Amino acid sequence: MNARTLLRLFAFVSFGLAHAASAQGLTPEQMQSAESDYQRYCALCHGADRQGHVNDHAPSLRSRSLLETGFPMVLREAISYGRPGTPMGGYLDEVGGPMTRDQIRNLAHWLATVAEARPFPLGAAPVQGDVAEGAKLYRKNCAGCHGGKGEGGTGTALGNAAMLALTPDAFLRHAIANGRDGTPMPAFLGKLTDPQIDSLTAFLRSRASGWEQRTPVLAEPPPLDRIVLNPDAAEPEFTLRDGLYVSAAELDRELKAGKKMVLLDTRVTSMWQMAHIAGAVPAPYYASREEVMASLPTDGTWIVAYCECPRAAAESVVTRLRASGLQNTAVLYEGIQGWISLGYPVAAGRAEGGADTHDHAH
């Protein structure tokens, strides 16, 4: 089982847990509050009746296809962190928006409820295709609506690194194959063959590190004897929030200054494969990872951990590190979702069958 398959299995389990919770529904008060939030924050572009394309080519939020396949993770990520490079900003208070996580959760549930959507998992299989063929198919079938470089038009902007880095292949493929009901997006199932749809999906995935990238640029995890970044440099200067959290802005500043530190990616390793902060070593929260932990410096070198959620996994790892005596430790407050969505650089990991490896930032 390769790393990308593990990612899909992780997403499948996460979806199942979230969907089980959603079965409880919202109270009438929560429904009313969520609708009020929608009208206040979303209706200007998405329309008072969720019809979409009122301003800035905002997509329809009545589409069952979108809501059934994007609930809850894709939908909540888009609302929380926005889509950099498009008019869609992040509405989570942690990135400067006006909404709490509970408000965004309720808004996502409200959208699915009023659309009478029945969310379902898309499966765990990765999508493999011919990227070069996918590029040709995109120019012929997609560019007229989505733009020659994915910049959007009458269709959604697809050339968005944050969306592509965080959106599962199966979500993209389902949209291509089945279209988006209630929108101009047609279903290509029957118009294109299954291998052609796979190739279109693979092409879009390949743009996650920039639309002009010709081929995927990949990287391998740092060897365990070289996990300290800039070992001969000065220590970083962090001002920790609540004695634990470092901001994305501070971490980016110190990385750009070439400071000495260790970065731990505490997510499931397959998520490191999709996108990670350059130089980070996989150290999943769920495993003891003795070989990684044994390689950590004990000389006071700063160790910064991050995860997707945005903090729970990283906090669990840092708690263990501090209990073992490593006090110069911190958690990236925004998590990698916030990091990516705020425009900070990431690298792509090694994918099965990939090219020669080296780091690449976008």
Image (cartoon, rainbow, N blue to C red):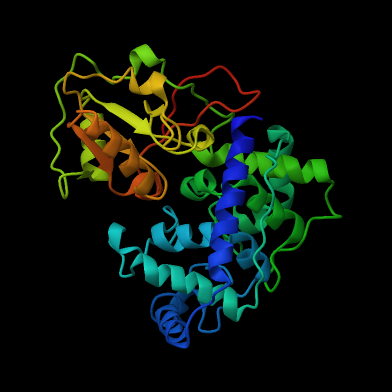
Quarter of the figure that contains the N terminus: top right
Q: Residue at the location (41% across, 32% down)?
A: 361
Q: Is residue 299 left or right of residue 12?
A: left
Q: Residue at x 58, y 48 (%)?
A: 11
In the picture, the quarter occupied by the C terminus is top left
Q: Which residue is drawn at 39% across and 72% down?
A: 103
Q: Residue 132, how many percent across, how many down?
A: 70, 33
Q: In the image, residue 162 lies at what x, y percent?
A: 46, 48
Residue 289 lies, in percent from the top left, at 42, 26
Judging depth in this view, the residue of 314 and 75 nearest the camera is 314
Q: In which quarter of the image is residue 329?
A: top left
* Left or right: 201, with 58 as reference point: right
- Residue 55 appears left or right of 318: right
Residue furthest to the front in view is 323
Relative vertical location of residue 299 with respect to residue 197 in this rendering, above or below: above
Would you place residue 144 above or below residue 169 in this image? below
Which sits in the foreground, 268 or 76?
268
Classify 311 as above or below 299: below
Residue 142 at least partly seen: yes
Counting the numbered discs, the total is 0
- Whether residue 21 is situated above or below residue 142 in the rendered picture: below
On the question of residue 339 being in view, the answer is: no
Residue 322: quadrant of the picture: top left
For residue 354, side relative to residue 97 (left or right) = right
**Residue 244 image point, x, y percent:** 20, 44
